[in-house]
Image: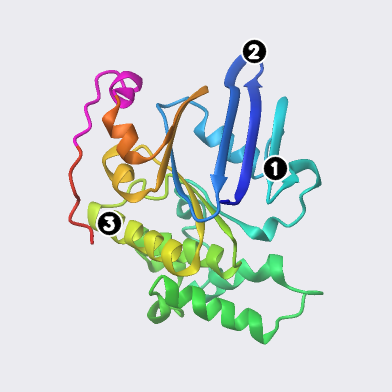
Amino acid sequence: MSEPIIEIEDIWFSYGAEPVLEGVSLEVIRGDILGLIGPNGSGKTTLLKLILGLLSPQRGTIRLFGQELGRFREWARLGYVRQRGWDFERNFPASVEEIVRLGRVPRLRWGAWRRIDTEAVERALHAVHIEGLRHRPISELSGGQQQRVFLARVLAQEPEILVLDEPTAAVDPKVEAEFYKLLRKLNREQGLTILLVSHDLEAIVTQVTKIACLNRKLLFCGTPQECLASDLLERVYVGKRLMHHQHPWG
């Protein structure tokens, strides 16, 4: 049987009197690339924060790797790249390699740097093809390059689950295409499980193995083909018609 490594059961959450999530249940299976979609205000980012332990559900249960969230302590097994994360560190006086090395902090033993930590940083730099930028200040890089640096920082952590919140916001189509190609490669070659929030419907249906559509409640969970065959997107996005075509993204 496929192994569920994120289990969400009957989750409820509200900000004050405003309900955000109502009875959401969802599983993420090891090896999935799960695309989480939904209109603005549908609860997508809130659900990510609940999974990451940044918020606590008011009702329901979340399990990571079979363990209830309240008792889970192995946070290095999850890597998180937040929405437009580079905006907050654009002028940080550090090189690319120094930023990526920060990803090893959760894995250090007694604060000591070891050979395996250096090797993990090298693998991360290589995985996102930024070895040649290692000595460049982060502030000198383009948005797309910075995006790769912050992804490399998370990969240096060696997570088993990669959580991405709008990772291609404000980047051009070429950078977006390269980024999705990289995610597929990491999923295929390293077995990385990926949970991805995106508003780019045309992109996401061609890049993920499973789609979950959220609008306070879970409206759909299935394959992209099943999603496209239904009228779900047109209903949820008020007339949005999605054409199924192949992007020339490789």
Residue at image mark 1? 63
Q: Residue furthest top?
A: 17
> Going from the N terminus, do you reach mark 3 or mark 2 first?
2
**Residue 106 in view (yes/no):** yes
Which dot marks residue 17?
2
Horizontal side, residue 107 vs residue 160: left or right: right
- Up/down of 155 relative to 193, above or below: below
- Residue bearing mark 3: 177
From the image, give the main secondary structure of the stretch colored magenta: loop
How far across and how far down the image is residue 151, in percent?
Answer: 48, 62
In reply to whether residue 188 is colored magenta, the answer given is no
Q: Secondary structure at mark 3?
A: helix
Q: What are the residue bounds of the magenta stretch?
A: 231-243
Residue beneath the point at 48% across and 72% down = 96
The kind of residue on which mark 1 rests is Arg
Quadrant into which the C terminus falls: bottom left
Asked whether residue 57 is in view, the answer is no
Q: Residue at x 54, y 48 (%)?
A: 29
Q: Where is residue 182 drawn, in percent x and y?
A: 37, 63
Does label 2 or label 1 sit earlier along the sequence?
Answer: 2
Quadrant in the picture for residue 131: bottom left
Task: Pick the residue in front: 62 or 157.
Answer: 62
